[in-house]
Image (tube, rainbow, N blue to C red):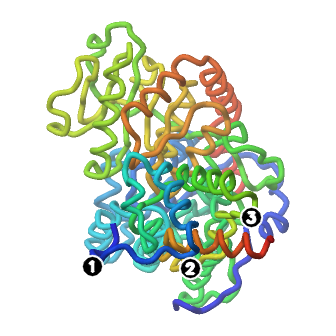
Amino acid sequence: MRGRRVQVPSLGEMLGTAPAPPPEEEPVRRRFLFAVPPVPGNVAPARAVAAELAARGHRVAWTGHKDSLEPLLKGGSRIFHAEDPAFSGRFAAARSEGLGLRGPAALRFLWERLLVPLGHAMLPGVENAVDRFRPDVVVSDQQILAAPVVARRRGLPWATSAATSAEFARPLAGLPLVEEWVRDQVGAFQLDNGIEDLIDLRFSDHLVIVYSTGALLGDVSFFPDHVAFTGPALGRAPRGDFPLDLLDGRPVVLVTLGTLGTPVGERFLRAAAEAVAGLDVQAVLVAPDGMLPDPPPNVIVRPEVPQRALLDRVAAVVSHGGHTTVCEALAHGLPQVVAPVRDDQPVVARQVEAAGAGRRVRFGRTTPDELRAVLADVLADDAYRAAAERVAASFRAAGGAATAADRLEKLA
Amino acid sequence: MTGTTGPAPAPGGGTFEAVAALLAAVVAPAAPPADLRPDTLLYGDLDLEDAEVDAFADRLRAEFGPAADLPGLLAEQDLDGLLALTVGDVAADVDARRGAAS
C-alpha cells in the first residue's frame, strides 16, 4: 500500500461539512461499544465516560486486547477480544522497541508498526463484537482505525474518543508533507479494507469527544458543534497508598514520567532529583526501586503513587507532558514544568506554556541547574498558578464525563 | 556522533562553523562544536527536541537575518528528508537562501 497516493479529506474540510446535531430526545436505555488500545492513558477517559453511561442505565461493552484491558477496567466489564494472538505478541514487543525513538522516527514507527497493524489485527474482532453486542453507538479511541471502519460498514453512528487533544492543534501544520503522509496511512487502511469513500478515521463526522477545553487548547470557536470539548473525564480516583505523614509542610513537587519506559527517563529523573535538592521543597519522585538509591534528603522516591489523591497536597508538577497527567494536574489548578519526550507530548507542553500554566523544558539534555531555575520560577510566580486555576475552572464548567455521556446519548 | 572518519570539508565557507556553533549552544551541554560535523543528523544523531528546534531557528535568524529560515527548510521535508537532514544541510540552506535574497 505504501506509495499509493489517496485523497483523504482534511480536518478543515471535514469540519466544514459537519452535520447538524441530532434533535434532543428523552434518554432511553442504549448500548455503547468502546474500542480502545491496550494503553492506560487512552483507556482512562473512556472508562470514566463508560461508567457515567452505565450509571444512567445504559449497557456498555469493550473491544480490544482482553488480557490487557481487564486490569484497566472495572471488574465484570464485558470485553470482546479483538486482536489476533500472533499480532498481540508482536505489538507488545514493538511498543517496547519503539520506546527509544523520538521525533520523526517515533512518528513513522507509531503509524507503520503500531497503529496500522493494530487496525488490521483488530478488525475481525471488532466486527464480531458489533455483531454480538449490537451497539447503538460505537465509541472509538482516536488511535483505533478498525472501529470506525466497522461502524461505517454497519451504518452505525460512531464517536471519536480523543485521549489527547494534540491532533486538534494540527501539530504537523508546519510539516505539510509529513501531515499528508499520516493522512495517506489512514486512507490506505480504508482502501485495504475495501472502503473507497475515504474519511479521516481520527475524526468522526458524528461526534468527537476531546478531553480538554479552549482554555488549554487555544481558540476552539471555529470547531463545529459535533466536536465536543468536554474537559478531562476523570472518573473515580484509583486507590493507592502514600504515607502523607512524610510530608513536612514545605511545598511539594510531584515528579512523574507517567507510564513512560523508565530506561528512557532515568537521566531526567536523576537531573530532577539533583535540581530539587537545592530548593526549599519536598519532592515526591516516581521512579522504580533502585534507580535512585541515595536520593537527596528532601526527595521521596516511590515506584508508584496515588497521583490524584496526592495532587491535593502538591504545589507544582514536573512531568513528561502526558495528556492525562497534565490535565489531572491542571484540574487541580497546579502549575507545571513539562519536559516532553515524544508523540503528542511536545504539543501538550506548548499548550501548557501558551496557557501560561507552566514552562516547557528539554527532556534529553536538561541540566539540574536549568531545571532548578525553571521550577523555582514556576513555584514563585503566582501567575502560573492563576493560569492553571483558570484552566481548572474551564474544565469544571465543561462537565467532563457527564457532558461526554450527554453527547453520546444524543447520538444513540 | 556520526561515523568514525575525520571531519568532512565544511560546506559554504565559514557558514558551517557558524551554524555549528549556534547549534552547539542550543544542545549544550551535550555536544561541543568540535563534535558537530556536516554529516551530523539533526534527528538521528542529536535527537533535536521541539524546544531546541525553536531555539535553533531563533538563533539562526538572529545571526543570519530573516533569510535564514529553518522552519521553511523543515516544511520542505518528508519523513525521510527530516531523518536525513544534517547540520551541513542547514548551513547549505542558509547560504542558498541568503544568495537568493541578495
The picture places residue A60, in percent across and down from the top left corner, at 50, 53
Contact check, label 3 and label 1, Cβ < 8 Å: no
Outermost residue to the front: B13
The reply to the same-chain question for discs 3 and 2 is no
Mark 1 secondary-structure assignment: helix
Tell me whether circle 2 and circle 1 mark residues in contact (CB < 8 Å). Answer: no
Question: Distance from label 3 to label 2 (Cα)?
Answer: 34 Å
> Dot 1, crowdedness within 10 Å: few (<14), some or many (≥20)?
few
Name the residue type under label 2: Gln
Q: Are marks 3 and 2 in contact (CB under 8 Å)?
A: no
Label 1 is placed on what type of residue?
A: Ala
Identified at 55% across, 60% down, the residue is B18
The chain carrying label 2 is A
Name the residue carrying label 3: B67
Q: Amino acid at mark 3?
A: Ala
Q: Quadrant of the N terminus of chain B?
A: bottom left
In the rendered image, residue A183, in percent from the top left (x then y), is placed at 63, 76
Please tell me which residue lies in front, A366 or A29.
Answer: A366
Mark 2 = which residue? A185
Whether residue A129 is visible: no
- Residue highlighted by disc 1: A86
Quadrant housing the C terminus of chain B: bottom right
Q: Residue at x 56, y 35 (%)?
A: A359
